Amino acid sequence: MLRRQDTGGLLCRSVEEAEHLLGKMQQLYDIRDYAGVVSLQRREIWKCLRLFADSQTCVEIACLLATAMTASGTHTVAIAYFRWAQRHYNGCDMITSANALCGRPAKLLMARIWAGLGRAYTEVGNFADAESYFASCIWLRADLHNTPATMMPYRLMQAQNWHALHKHDKAIVTILEIMLSDGRTEAATVDFAARLADKSGICPLQLLGRCYTAIGKYNESLTCLALAFSSSSKREDAVSMVTCRLEYAVTQVAHVKCENRSLERTAHALYFSTDFIGPPLSVTMVQRQVVQLCTEAHGMAGDVSFRIFMNGNGHPTAVRQVLSGAYEEPRCVLPLKVAWRAVESSQLSDSGSPFSLALVFESTKRAQNAIHVVEHTFHCTVGVELPSLTSFLSEFLSRPLHYSQTAQTEDNMRLAKSAFESATELALQHKLVALHRDCVIFRLCLQFEQNMGDTDTIDTFKQVLQAQVDAAKTPNPKCFTCNQDCTGITVCGGCRVVRFCDAPHQKHASNRPFFSTTVSHKLICPLLVLCKSLSKCKAKPDGGGAEAVLLAEKYDKGLLQFLSTDHFIKYLDHESDMPGTHIHSLLP
């Protein structure tokens, strides 16, 4: 290996080669050919770094290579090159090395290294280390008296990391300071966001929308995400366009769910503030009172609506018939109605009461905007407890109270559905496989919630999982986290389907941060195992036989369990009323 002290001629030639290589890399980087920069790694860059031709030139080469790797998604290797550049330059800790640097170009280079380390650590989920590097970078650039415009991309990166650390208030203040640096119209705001996204790789409007979502400011978030989509469209950034539409859809659903919870609380408050306060009734006593209401028709067919009044603990206290024209408390929907068939005179007592009744209970089940009517028939003997009816009433009493939704809530849900469809079409159009899969899964979960037991939804979900299993058989699989072609790729030990660049990307895929709209792999992994096992079983000459039947049943049960889970419920824990400037301040 040649060293600096070998010969003057060799050293001079090595310096020239290093500077020529740096110029070639810079040209490729300027036209965003990041793959071209990375392709020089084995052929020329390693040789140059081994020769140790020129300290500052080698540091610049390593820094530019690492930056290109970060842009192309190879974050772990990028971190290694950034750390090599930092260590190779002076071998001191960050603050000491900053004081030891001589000259403005050297300080700017170190600031680039720290910013690159912060960005790469953010991408692999190491947000705590990223925060310290961003703080050092901004401190050093402030020491260099950089203009506010020059500082904006780095402050935006720092705000993104704060958001990941759940410091949403600090992130919002920083982004608004950047966006409000000049009075702008809506169109100018969109253009400014597009230019800033080109410099930093982060759309400030989209990041601001995520922060507002995280603290429950859904109206502000939706405004930001709509503007972010316009900004992404101007830049023709397909990935950003799809993520903006997907996040807009998820935020709309979260908005509806939070509003529904508020209405549900109102319904409970009104429902529990009735005058029918007394000792709680057992379910058996509730059944007797319900049947007694039905016997008052003296054998004639009829129907009746009734309500069961509850005390503050949610226990039944009284059963009352609802008379036509009677006043109803607002937002309380009568969810239960019972009808009975006519009884022959031979089945009536001397007082005209029937000995037995065939009761048909009609209950309503609401799933978002869809109302499902379910009928339950019971043949009961008056005065004798019927276990099946008792079980039905017990389940009915345990349901949450029903409430009427506002027209605005229904409009928001329609907007969410439209955004899901738009995101799915865009992802399909631009061949963004991973994003398309996430869009479809979220849309299926919402669709299944509104139409319980929809077989089309389950079949579509099976197709999505089967496509993911089939994609794993391709000769050049991509990392599930960064969607890049990687060498030395790691296979998930559970499903043996999904692959990752390295262990940090594998961990990041299963422990998604709150704001992520990527479905966590640990939720999908068991389903992929079943899908893969069922496919192998069916491929046997006999079609798998009884084993295939058992696997199919287990697979269907797993799919139903996944689709029945409320994947939007996490947003209900992020409601807040943080004071401060809102996005509407950006617009005239």
Image (cartoon, rainbow, N blue to C red):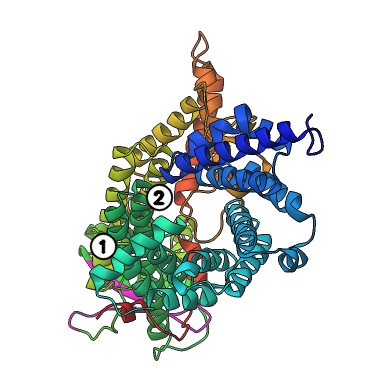
Q: Is residue 309 magenta?
A: yes
Residue furthest right in the image = 5
Q: Is residue 263 above or below residue 108?
A: below
- Closer to the chain start, of discs 2 and 1, is 1
**Mark 2: which secondary structure?**
helix
Residue furthest bottom in the image = 275
**Which range of residues does the magenta coloring cover?**
303-325
The total of numbered circles placed on residues is 2
Mark 1 surroundings: few (<14), some (14-19) or many (≥20) residues within 10 A: some
Measuring from the top left, give residue 532's x and y in whole percent: 54, 26
- Which residue is painted at 29% across and 84% down in the image? 329
* 415 relative position to 27: left or right: left
| Amino acid type of the residue tagged 2 in the rendering | Phe
Mark 2 surroundings: few (<14), some (14-19) or many (≥20) residues within 10 A: many
Measuring from the top left, give residue 253's x and y in whole percent: 36, 62
For the residues marked 2 and 1, what is the alpha-carbon distance in whole angstroms? 39 Å
Point out which mark residue 339 bears.
Answer: 1
| Amino acid type of the residue tagged 1 in the rendering | Ala
Measuring from the top left, give residue 150's x and y in whole percent: 47, 67
Report which residue position mark 2 lands on.
442
Q: Is residue 404 magenta?
A: no
Quadrant placement of the N terminus: top right
Of marks 2 and 1, the one in the foreground: 2
Q: Quadrant of residue 417?
A: bottom left
State the predominant SS element of the stretch in magenta. Answer: strand
Quadrant placement of the C terminus: bottom left
Decide if residue 350 is in sight here: no
Is 344 or 315 nearer to us in this picture? Answer: 315
Is 459 or 523 nearer to us in this picture? Answer: 523
